[in-house]
Amino acid sequence: MMTRGAFLAAVALALSGLCNPASSQEAFPSRPLKIVVGFAAGGSSDTVARLLAEKLAVRFGKPVIVENRPGAGGMVATSQLLREPADGYQVLLLASAHSVTAALRTSMPFDPVDDIEWLSTAATYGMAFGVRPDSPYGSLAEIVAAAKARPRTLSYYSVGYGTGHHLLGEWLNAATGAEFTHVPYRGSAAAISDFLGGRVDLMIDTMTFVHPHAAAGKVRTLAVTSRLVPPEMAAVPFSGDVVPGLAYESWLGLAIRKGAPAAIVERWRAEITAVVQSDAFAQDMSRLGANAAASTGPVFAERVRREIAEFSRVIEARGIERQQ
């Protein structure tokens, strides 16, 4: 039978645990964190993920590792994340390709909106059409005219079938009557080698990827799909002025597995928002040709839901075959 002294000691120990939760559960984070990227190293998603990781590591006081898991427009990384423990130690950097891929598939192993906890967008940016400096085409109108005159003889690259890059090329075909041949790659880094080597005619890529190549004189930018561009690209034509209605803004954002502890989800959201809204991150994005842009989780989720519906309409209009 417990003595009165032992009983009081047990009560005191229990109360101390209630008053000091840190003594009864592990503080977060207690080990390195991870940002999973569904695209190859060297592309815009990877670049932004590493900038975020560097700044988030300072705020969390723990290393933040970037892990690349390319494939299927980012779905390989998303599927893998949803199989990991819901402990909050991994987040996923998603691109707008997530919406495109979801629209392209006849079925999904998970709900592309409701099975994910959306944290915040990090950056938005236009896409760019570009050619090599030695290209005979001086404008988007000129290369489109050539593609109409000689169907399937000119090509454009994308970072994979079912990405925003791919559908933007199909959108250009549909809007102009041109017939560019689509050449898919696994990431921008792989595509740029063939493009610069003359094996692909038209670059369709993110501003975050095109901007440094244009600044180095390796790419001549013909048009951009957003009016929000770096000052040094202010003279580049807006695609909507060349091809009516051709306007598009891509995004990068962070999500976490649904079911992660609410307090950890909110900690991630708060730290990401603080980083994205900082002057340092805004300057980083400006140098890349992007705009720092934070959002709430519900607003982010609604954006994805709306895009899936919009891309579905493009796919149906072009008669693009959906994947299993």
Image (cartoon, helix red, strand yellow):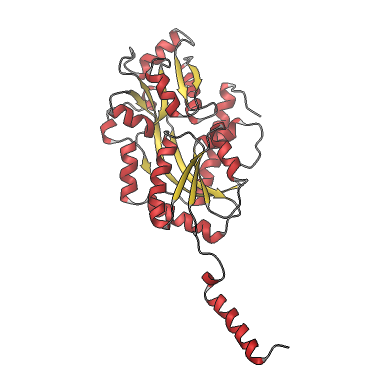
Is residue 27 in view from this perspective? yes
Q: Quadrant of the N terminus?
A: bottom right
Say which of 197 and 295 sits in front: 197
Q: Taking 206 as reference, is 9 above or below it?
A: below
Q: Residue, x 35% and y 34% (percent of image)?
A: 227
- The residue lying furthest to the top in this view is 150
Residue 23 lies, in percent from the top left, at 53, 71
Q: Quadrant of residue 232?
A: top left
Q: Is residue 87 left or right of residue 53?
A: right
Q: Count the marks.
A: 0
Residue 16: horizontal and vertical position, in percent? 55, 79
Is residue 246 visible in the rendered image? The answer is: no
The quadrant of the image that shows the C terminus is top right
Residue 14 quadrant: bottom right
Q: x, y (%) of residue 159?
A: 48, 28
Across and down, in percent, residue 42 comes to: 41, 33
* Residue sitting at x 48%, y 55%: 268
Above or below 143: residue 78? below
**Residue depicted at x 66% and y 34%:** 107
**Residue found at the far bottom of this picture:** 4
Q: Looking at this view, is 43 or 300 the one in front?
A: 43
Give the camera-side residue of 254 and 229. Answer: 254
